[in-house]
Image: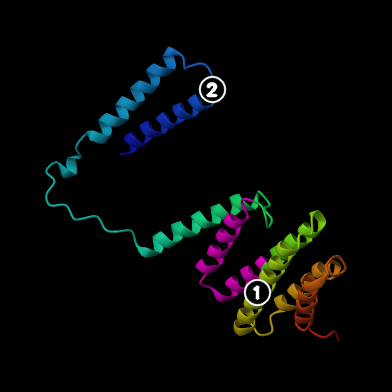
Amino acid sequence: MKRARRSRERVLDHLTELSERPLGGGPDPAFRERLRAELASARALDQAPSPRHARPAHRRPRRRRPLLAQLASAGAVVTLLLSMVSTYQAVPGDTLYPLKRAAESTLVRLTTDDVVRAERELVSAKTRAKEVAQLLGESGEGPLVGRTLKEMEQSTRAGITRLERVEPRSPKIGKFAESQKNMVEPMIEKLDGDEQDQAVGYLDYIEGLVPPSG
């Protein structure tokens, strides 16, 4: 088994070497011969019968992958997807934005720890606030701004409600409220109509979360 593994590793090394070659020209004959020899060696070792199982009897059916392993794989995929989407810095109205939101929501739903889930909801609220600020700095389109403000408030209330249930006096609540206040307050003068009313109502809500000084 170790010999077969070493052969496969050498094959991978050769393939890596091939991938690093410039496009337009094939590998030299010596390289092709080395690769062909390694592939043949690895295949022969894989097909050779194992001494311990020269006469395979009744084989047990393969067990299905445990549910926990499946969930772990799904979580890893979602985390990778969220990382990929975040590199695009998509905002409402962008083509990739629905994919970003879907990955973000899935990551929250997969979280079983209440504290972590609440924190991720609050992170989503902060992200929505940054998106509103960016929209106002670009075009200030009413429908997108209003919808993003609404989603910001929904994530905030969901996160705060959950966090207050599991950690009623958590300092994270006050820190979040202060941070959001500093983010949303400068937006008021750039908003008008329903969007301004939304932002003012949101500020009233989070100001009640800041613990009194002294």
Label 1 Cα crowd, 10 Å radius (few <14 / some 14-19 / many 20+): some
Cα separation, mark 1 vs mark 2, equals 52 Å
Label 2 Cα crowd, 10 Å radius (few <14 / some 14-19 / many 20+): few
Badge 1 marks a residue whose secondary structure is: helix
Q: Position of residue 149 (x, y in %)?
A: 72, 69
Q: Amino acid at mark 2?
A: Arg
In this view, the mark in front (1 or 2): 1
Please name whichever residue, 134 or 19, is drawn nearer the observer in this view of the structure: 134
Q: Position of residue 132 (x, y in %)?
A: 75, 62
75 displayed left or right of 180: left
- In the displayed orientation, state which residue is furthest to the top: 29
Q: Assess whether residue 107 is covered by the magenta stretch.
A: yes
Q: Assess whether residue 108 is covered by the magenta stretch.
A: yes
- In the displayed orientation, state which residue is furthest to the right: 189
State the extent of the magenta-drawn residues as a range.
95-124
The residue under the point 40% across, 29% down is: 11
Badge 2 marks a residue whose secondary structure is: loop
| Residue 154 numbered mark, or none | 1
The residue under the point 30% across, 39% down is: 1
Q: Position of residue 142 (x, y in %)?
A: 75, 63
179 displayed left or right of 76: right
Residue 163, picture quadrant: bottom right
State whether residue 39 is above or below residue 69: above
Q: Amino acid at mark 1?
A: Gln
The residue under the point 42% across, 13% down is: 29
> What quarter of the picture does the C terminus occupy?
bottom right
The residue under the point 42% across, 14% down is: 30
Residue 38, picture quadrant: top left
Q: Position of residue 65 (x, y in %)?
A: 33, 58
Total marks shown come to 2
Q: Which residue is mark 2?
A: 21
* Secondary structure mainly formed by the magenta segment: helix
